[in-house]
Amino acid sequence: MKTNMAERSKTADTGSSIGIDEIITGNLSKYPAVPPGYYGQPKKGHLLFDACFESGNLGRVDHVTEFEYDLFIRPDTCNPRFRVWFNFTVENVKESQRVIFNIVNFSKTKSLYRDGMAPMVKSTSRPKWQRLPPKNVYYYRCPDHRKNYVMSFAFCFDREEDVYQFAYCYPYTYTRLQHYLDNLQRRNMDYFCREFLGYSVQQRQLDLLTITNPDDKTDLENSVMQKKIKIPKLSLNHLEETVEIADYGDEDVELRHCKRKDGRKQNEGTHKSIEAVVARLEKQNGMSLSSNSSPEATFMESSERMNNMDDAVVPRILYEELLRSYQQQQEEMRHIQQELERTRRQLVQQAKKLKEYGTLVSEMKELRDLNRRLQDVLLLRLGSGSAIELEKVNPESIEPEPEVQKTFSEEANTSSYYPAAVPVMDKYILENGKVHLGSGIWVDGEKWHQLQVTQGDSKYTKNLAVMIWGTDVLKNRSVTGVATKKKKDAIPKPPLSPHKLSIVRECLYDRIAQETVDETEIAQRLSKVNKYICEKIMDINKSCKNEEKREAKYNLQ
């Protein structure tokens, strides 16, 4: 089925339209998604997309990067404004290959994907449908695709020989439905009847199913075919009332009152002639009049029946109980409406505060960037960036220890399979293979790129400190310049340069700001910079002492 019943209950954004570049004619058939400019046979890892099967839907694939693909789904039949269902297969994958699929032309403003629903997936070795983890699924409005709604999900292929299939939800095909109905029809059950109703737009059979008690089947057909007729009630003084010929039952009779609330009787109505009533009866095909009775006799019987109904009244106790219940419900409804109005006003105020907060955050970032650029211009006008250098040793000439280089390479290898590495930020100037961090501090460009893929604030801060100061400087310094209280005769070491510490904090702030906008979390993570650098200094001193012990032991031997 191309549309989920649960999703159809939500509101569709019928205003979304398909552009000329998104006109899709049919499903993809073994389509290789290769990088632009590539020619030849697809290699291992060049994904092959296919949707040419029953209930399949995928009309176009765009290769964005090695890890990211934009998918376009075809609209519903005879309704191009509804684009929800997708079902396709992917093959020719590599083991441990990670991808992000963006379905970019959804037409719904609200989706169950926002409430924890996730797409379905199965493979040839695991034919049972399973849901993806909800944490890997995102549903949002994307400005890069004309503000259409996009559903993105991440997935990791674990077996090269498998063919993977992704779907909006559990597929239920037309063929499967026909097989199920055929099995039911072969059982010859008395309470089940299948009849041919017609053909769909695509020339598929439409069935009419009747499920009922065999004894009541004739009565059911009669009640379906029978129509209700409105006939005016006649009296001798030409006071007529429109009544409905139907079987009201005992319950409806008991609930009738003698008079209406406005004081008028129910037998007061419009004046109609007998000829008009006879003409209406002749046009009605579902009702058959007896040949022995005249129209006047029929109307007199209806009049007597309505008079008998008017005599029945509701007991006073039941009426008062219903009235009290109705008044209580009205009072509760008033309270609920007041509560909703109060909540709406609070939400409006919160939305205004959030908007103001976002504006302040963006202005603060712009001011920080402007301040950094002004510092760089001021340093260039002074003529030399080294005039403010407080260190005796040039940090650019100090190479990190082999273990630090090894750490960089290991971290780069472990993060190579992520969809996209964090690029060098535009605010940092790259010139002659070196990156300018500000305040006249330059670091090696290749090591800076390796630093951006480091996982965790601790490793990032420690490796950045080694790049700026070097191990020879760090082992003879302390962060604050105050002697430790753990040793009584400890000698205080010279403190690290304050402006370089500020550079470390700013670099870490830029890194954290890409992950979150919560100022409380950013401040909490920035407060641990001194701790990380102290741990790095202790590690360097510990490794130096171990090296001295090994050399002393070797000389002794």
Image (spheres, rainbow, N blue to C red):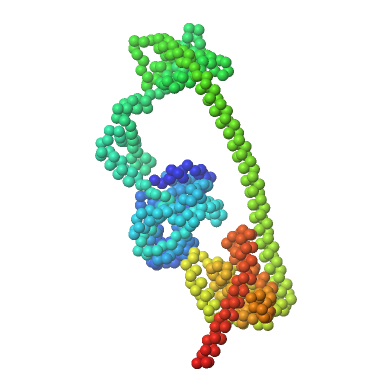
Q: Nearer the viewer, residue 198 or 523?
A: 523
Q: Residue furthest top?
A: 236
Residue 11's place in the image compared with 326, above or below, is below
Looking at the image, which residue is at 40% across and 9% down? 297
- Give x and y (percent) for residue 114: 51, 50
Q: Quadrant of residue 51?
A: bottom left
Q: Is residue 361 left or right of residue 307?
A: right
Asked if one can make out residue 109 in the rendered structure from this viewpoint, the answer is yes
Q: Residue furthest front?
A: 488
Residue 306's place in the image compared with 495, above or below, is above
Looking at the image, which residue is at 30% across and 33% down? 191
- Give x and y (percent) for residue 183: 28, 42
Q: Is residue 145 left or right of residue 47?
A: right
Q: Nearer the viewer, residue 390 or 67?
A: 390
Looking at the image, which residue is at 63% across and 66% down? 526
- Give x and y (percent) for residue 78: 43, 43
- Give x and y (percent) for residue 357: 66, 54
Q: Nearer the viewer, residue 545 or 253?
A: 545
How many numbered marks have been drawn onto this rendered protein structure?
Answer: 0
Asked if one can make out residue 445 in the rendered structure from this viewpoint, the answer is no
Q: Quadrant of residue 130?
A: bottom left
Looking at the image, which residue is at 64% across and 73% down? 436
